[in-house]
Image (cartoon, rainbow, N blue to C red):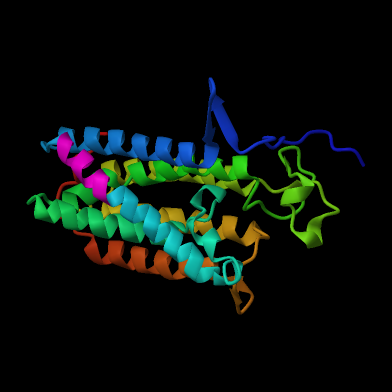
């Protein structure tokens, strides 16, 4: 049966700006980082902080996040590189694990903030909606790379994938679930949820970051369950599903333990 509608995939992973070819994956990650820095700087300034500090932190936190994301991907999918070690460094072809990225970037960012004598908990509140915004933008890099899509489908918003990018067991299918789009949209919802929580839920300073983590992992569990790319499985669930469950429960427990009704909510300036 012919498809009534579908989303086409880009014919190339490059975006040309005049004569200059740029890898779309890297460009979109850079745009996401820029958006996150701008939003975090604005929120920090509204709370009396020096926005220049956000730039200083980003200089260290962003590379640490990328390295952490790549390490997580390589460690959890080591089979992909056992006989192709040079591929470990081909980051432009995709392969960044969000868990390693958040952990590496947050840890180094907190260390730099502490070295500058800044309030780390306040900075965590400021960056909480900025990280899912960056993720929403960066996810479109998977679209240009034709990677990390979901199961075959004939839905009107199905994503057409070229044969060269389909797993061998799915060569007979042409259209798949656009999981990059689902996650990008969910990330934008997470931004809204974090801002809503900031205005309407009484939280200790720094706990807004846990709201982001809980909200993101809640949606990521569903998106991950749709994907068909290689992943280790335990008791029928992909590794990242288990990570989502554990991190979600930890974040929710952290939030519940930190609730204190006697305090005013944190400053809600965007």
Does residue 265 show up magenta in the picture? no
Residue closest to the eye, 88 or 63? 88
Inspect this view and state whether residue 78 appears.
Answer: yes
Residue 116, image x, y percentages? 9, 50
The residue drawn where x is 23% and y is 32% is: 42
Q: Is residue 132 left or right of residue 204?
A: right
The residue drawn where x is 49% and y is 52% is: 91
Residue closest to the eye, 168 or 119? 168
Q: Quadrant of residue 157?
A: top right
Residue 115, image x, y percentages? 10, 55
Q: Is residue 173 left or right of residue 62?
A: right
Image quadrant occupied by the C terminus: top left
The range drawn in magenta is: 51-60
The residue drawn where x is 50% and y is 65% is: 74
Q: Is residue 77 left or right of residue 126?
A: right
Placement of 211 over or under 257, stated as above or below: above
């Amino acid at each position: 049966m012919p498809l009534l509608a579908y989303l086409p995939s880009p014919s190339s992973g490059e975006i040309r700006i005049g004569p200059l070819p740029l890898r779309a994956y890297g460009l979109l990650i850079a745009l996401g980082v820029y958006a996150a820095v701008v939003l975090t700087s604005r929120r920090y300034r509204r709370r009396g902080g020096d926005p220049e500090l956000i730039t200083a932190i980003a200089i260290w936190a962003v590379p640490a996040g990328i390295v952490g994301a790549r390490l997580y991907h390589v460690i959890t999918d080591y089979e992909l590189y056992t006989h192709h070690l040079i591929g470990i460094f081909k980051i432009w072809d995709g392969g960044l694990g969000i868990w390693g990225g958040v952990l590496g970037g947050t840890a180094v960012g907190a260390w730099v903030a502490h070295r500058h004598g800044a309030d780390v908990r306040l900075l965590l509140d400021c960056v909480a909606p900025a990280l899912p915004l960056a993720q929403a933008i960066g996810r479109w890099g998977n679209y240009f790379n034709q990677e990390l899509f979901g199961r075959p489908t004939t839905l009107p918003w199905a994503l057409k994938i070229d044969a060269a990018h389909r797993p061998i067991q799915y060569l007979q299918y042409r259209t798949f679930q656009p999981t990059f789009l689902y996650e990008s949209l969910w990330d934008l919802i997470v931004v809204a949820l974090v801002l809503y929580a900031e205005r309407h839920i009484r939280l200790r300073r720094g706990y807004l970051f846990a709201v982001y983590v809980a909200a993101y992992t809640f949606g990521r569990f569903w998106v991950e369950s749709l994907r068909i790319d290689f992943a280790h499985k335990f008791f029928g669930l992909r590794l990242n599903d288990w990570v989502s469950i554990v991190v979600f429960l930890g974040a929710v427990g952290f939030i519940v333990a930190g609730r204190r009704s006697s305090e005013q909510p944190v400053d809600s300036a965007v």
